[in-house]
Image (cartoon, rainbow, N blue to C red):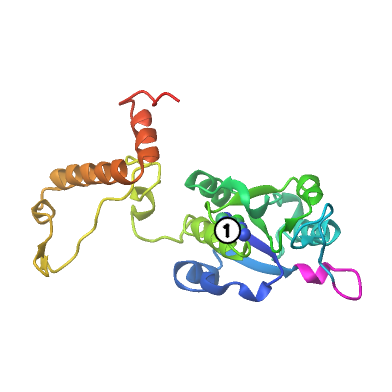
């Protein structure tokens, strides 16, 4: 049974969107993962199909109703929903349910790895001012943000999270080593940003490629890349650089 994502959204037609293209799209067509989007409005109960209401205490915007969101989550979590193609239901591991919100814990590669290693995800995309707090608590939703800026809804964040997970699934990324060596991976270059890349021509607009890369000396190339990765990390991301130094046992953590 493949890794499965269920999106709960008011805009189900946004999916698969970009996830139907390129690496994720090919993996989707190959059955390495599955995607379904559920329209939250389909779980409205009144004749106006209302999904939101005004906030208690006043203020601008609307809040997604707990009863409607709960019914959508129940449908996504229902036994059998996790195993659509005749797999035994008893073996189905429940998928974690995440609520995408700028209030959430920041998505990082450690969480991406954890989610990709599991059975899949259920992703609730927020709109309006948010979701009634009680359904977040009652369903134990993990709140996740993709960065310190505000999107108009959780859908693009869901796409970001899924893209990051899908490329880690077995058989999705072909190129040997490319998933292990890159930025944030956890391999030998733990938490370093990537070194710069070059291809032909060896000189372009008067700019030569660093000569060591043309030398054929693999050990020297590896040393140059390591040094370049360290320099660019120290320059751009002092936070990652400090973490790297601690992991490598090269310096004490800065006092705070
Ligand atoms: Cl997950 N949702 C929204 N609406 N904005 C965000 C976000 C999520 N992550 C960063 N900004």
Q: Quadrant of residue 69 in the image? A: bottom right
User: Which image quarter is the N terminus in?
Assistant: bottom right
Element type at marker 1? loop
Looking at the picture, does residue 93 appear above or below residue 255?
below
Q: Position of residue 112 (x, y in %)?
A: 52, 50
Q: Is residue 217 left or right of residue 32?
A: left
Q: Is residue 213 left or right of residue 250?
A: left
Residue 150 part of the magenta segment: no
Q: Give percent across and percent down for residue 191.
A: 38, 41
From the viewer's perspective, is 81 left or right of 29?
Answer: right
Q: Residue at x 51, y 61 (%)?
A: 163
| Rendering coords of residue 234 (x, y %) | 30, 40
Looking at the rendering, the quadrant in which ligand 1 lies is: bottom right
- First to last magenta residue range: 40-49
Q: Is mark 1 within 8 Å of ligand 1?
A: yes
Q: Quadrant of the C terminus?
A: top left
Residue 211 vertical placement versus 244 (above, below): below
**Relative to 36, does residue 179 appear above or below in the rendering?**
above
Above or below residue 34? Residue 66 is above
Name the residue that disc number 1 marks: 150
Residue found at x 49% / y 67%? 24
Would you say residue 48 sits in the magenta stretch? yes
Q: Main secondary structure of the magenta part?
A: loop
Residue 225 seen from this side: yes
Q: Residues within 10 Å of mark 1 (few under 14, many from 20)?
A: few
Answer yes or no: is residue 1 visible: no
User: Depth check: 220 or 224 in front?
Assistant: 224
> Between 177 and 20, which is closer to the camera in this rendering?
20
| Quadrant in the picture for residue 72 | bottom right
Q: From the top left corner, tell me how far across and down residue 219 is, in percent.
A: 15, 43
| Residue nearer the viewer, 18 or 153 | 153
């Amino acid at each position: 049974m493949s890794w499965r994502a269920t999106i709960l959204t008011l805009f189900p037609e946004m999916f698969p969107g970009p996830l139907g293209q390129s690496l994720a799209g090919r993996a989707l067509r190959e059955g390495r993962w599955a995607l379904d989007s559920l329209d939250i409005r389909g779980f409205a109960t009144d004749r106006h199909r209302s999904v939101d209401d005004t906030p208690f205490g006043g203020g601008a915007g609307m809040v997604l109703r707990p009863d409607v969101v709960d019914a959508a989550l129940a449908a996504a979590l229902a036994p059998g929903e996790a195993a659509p193609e005749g797999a035994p239901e008893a073996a189905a591991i429940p998928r974690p349910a995440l609520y995408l919100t700028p209030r959430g814990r920041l998505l990082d590669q450690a969480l991406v790895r954890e989610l990709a290693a599991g059975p899949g995800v259920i992703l609730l995309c927020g709109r309006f001012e948010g979701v009634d707090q009680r359904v977040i608590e009652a369903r134990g939703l993990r709140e996740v943000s993709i960065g310190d800026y505000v999107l108009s809804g959780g859908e693009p964040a869901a796409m970001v999270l899924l893209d990051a997970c899908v490329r880690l699934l077995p058989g999705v990324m072909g190129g040997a080593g490319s998933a292990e060596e890159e930025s944030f991976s956890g391999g030998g270059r733990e938490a370093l940003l990537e070194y710069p890349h070059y291809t032909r021509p060896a000189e372009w607009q008067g700019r030569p490629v660093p000569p060591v890369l043309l030398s054929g000396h693999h050990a020297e190339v590896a040393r140059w890349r390591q040094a370049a990765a360290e320099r660019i990390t120290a320059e751009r991301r002092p936070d990652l650089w400090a973490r790297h130094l601690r992991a490598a046992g090269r310096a004490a953590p800065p006092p705070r």
